[in-house]
Image (cartoon, rainbow, N blue to C red):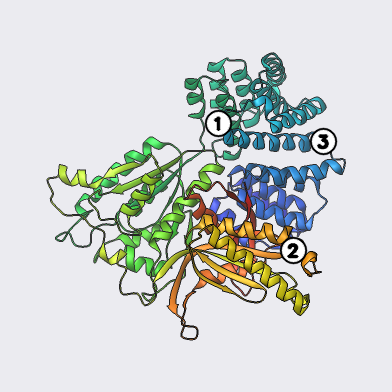
Amino acid sequence: MLSCFIIYNIFMLENKTKIQQLHERWLEHNKDLWALDVNTYLAFVEECILKAELLLAYDVLSEGIDLFPDHLQIKTSFALVLNRMEMSEEAKSVLMDLLQENHEDEVVLGILASAYKNLARKKQAASPFQSPVTNEHLGMSIEFYQKAYAQSKNTWHGINLATLQMIIGNEKVATDIAKEVFRNLFNQAQDLVINNYWDLATLGEALVILQDYDEAINYLKRAIEGNKKDIGSQVATKKNLSLLFHYQKIPRDIYTQLTNLFSIPKIVVFSGHMIDKDEKADCRFPKWLESVVSDLIKKKLELLGDIETYSSAACGADILFIEHALQKGAKINIILPCARELFIKKSVNYLAGSNWEKRFYKILDSDINLIELTSITDDHLEIPYDFANQLIFGLSKMHARNLCTELIPFVVYNKDSKELDGGTASVVSDWKKLKLDIEKIELDKLLKEKNASCDAKEAPLLHSRTGYRYAGHTVSLLYADTVNYSKLSDYEMMRFGEITLEFLNKTLKENNYKVGEKNTWGDAFFISFDDACEAGCCALTMMDFINNFNWRNVGVNKNIKMRMALHAGVVYSFKNPLTGQITFNGINVCRAARMESITPPGRVFCSEEFAAFCETLNIDKFSCSYVGQKLMPKHLGKYPTYLLRRT
């Protein structure tokens, strides 16, 4: 039975499993069967890495490590994935443990060197004018690459060592190593796999260092053309080239030619108007413009090359955009603000006799990633269109950073449209505040060209803020709970509560944090913030205080730890008949509370929604690092979860 199972898995992987199927297979996998052979995990992870599905690879390896805690390849694969996810400190920790266990082989040394290189790149980004010679992470990276290369003469280690030696100014050493790497690989030409990405890319990188740019472009072009789907490897090569370019080791025009070769998809985040319901009334996007706009979208996308997209899926511009992106073979991410049934009613099928609903379902039947932000199915609750737009942008920006690629905002927009929360005009306004270069199809200009006269406005059906029983508020929620609180004595409970809440109150007031609802229990507190940055800073300040305070000096003899969790989302308010205060409620309040209970003591976890929301604000005071899909208590399900920490 085991051999058949493994053969089945290999068959699935050899048939280039689509991304959606990859995720479905993981969700449906039989842990007991997979646990019979570690190679099942390793083969699946290899396919995830190939498709740059790093979050999925992280989840698979997390389970693999639990089952095979002493398996070297599982651990090194985990470190590799952590490093590619920009979690290089965590990768370094895994690898340093392996070194202490005497696993000083070239694979461990090479990935550790790469982790230090990533840390050096981050430090360079934070201090762009610092000399590379004084970057201690760069020095450690060179040291470990030297050890790995001396041990194995592996050309992967050699080309990275040559790159870093070039960066710190040791050009003679760099060119000597590059020549040796090129010679060793070229002499093995008869044995080279014709489409082996790393062999061809390494030859190309060596030629870049040797300044034979025409041949470098030729080899890199061959590497990429034969391995267009190996996005993860291309990202690694692009990062090396970007380091050389930053330190002025490659001319700008050559760097542009090199980076244009990659098939790493650009990330396109899209927003556009819905088709007008009544063309006789005020209009923005009349039906008779559909074919014109469709052609313009197609032409715009043709110019962008390989893409991955983030958008909603309303009738009109959204669906036109997705249809053409699918025709290009793009990976599609769709984020809906509510359950699809209500979304269809409000945003897809509100035009009598149209075929938009049929086109919507055809899209859903394609290889797409669909996220429904809320479970709202009726008209009693306000639909969070504005929050959905912010999440679409935040998720796209996070993914663009992970792929080291360009983020392209794209709108189909009528500039005469009134700016209401959740509409395309509001999205354009937000993107302009971030000083983004926006690709536009301007409906107002098209209407003028057609000599059409109409006064554009947002669609009242979609964006009316009246008629809801409960109003929605976009907030960031902080839940905190004390570990082993019941083991404290009465006096210890009183002192702990008094000191903690006094410091919390002082923190809120001194920083003038804008808070909504706040509440405390004996062992816990809950606060809603208008601003995600303030929520994150408050959580970290409180956690530092709890972890570092000398509790024994005030009569608390137990080791005090708290768990904290942050979540961003739309909550609904009502006046509590019992307290007379405004109270927030809804599934997002539950999400924050449930996540707190699975957070390790002394740590702050946050949701993907909070992490993405922070991306829209360009926050640099803390970072959110992925820690996997976590199962929430009380049947709430599994959700992507992140660790919050200071930068």
Vertical relation: 165 (above or below) 622:
above
Q: How far apart are marks 3 and 2 (CA)?
A: 31 Å
Residue 524 % position (x, y)? 64, 72
Q: Residue furthest right?
A: 102
- The N terminus sits in image quarter: bottom right
- Seen in the image, is 606 located left or right of residue 441? right
CB atoms of marks 1 and 3 within 8 Å = no
One can see residue 574 in this view: yes
Q: Mark 1 sits on what residue?
A: 224
Q: Three-letter amino acid code at disc 2?
A: Asp
Q: Mark 3 points at which residue?
A: 105
Q: Is residue 523 left or right of residue 575?
A: right
Give the mark toward the camera: 1 or 3: 3
User: Pointer 2: what residue?
Assistant: 32
- Front-lying residue, 118 or 645: 645
Q: Residues within 10 Å of mark 1 (few under 14, many from 20)?
A: many
Q: Nearer the observer, disc 3 or disc 2?
A: 3
Q: In which quarter of the image is residue 233?
A: top right
Real-space CA distance between mark 1 and mark 2, rounded to the nearest whole angstrom: 38 Å
Dot 2 falls on a residue whose secondary structure is helix
Q: Mark 3 or mark 2: which comes first in sequence?
A: 2
Left or right: 475 as drawn, with respect to 521: left
> Could you say which is closer to the camera, residue 206 or residue 537?
537
Q: On the image, which quarter does residue 635 sit in?
A: bottom right
The structure residue drawn at horizontal position 52% and vertical position 46%, both measured from the top left corner, is 399
Q: SS of the residue at dot 3?
A: loop
Question: Mark 2 Cα within 10 Å, few/some/many (few <14, many 20+)?
Answer: few
Residue at horizontal 75 percent and vertical 50 percent from the top: 39
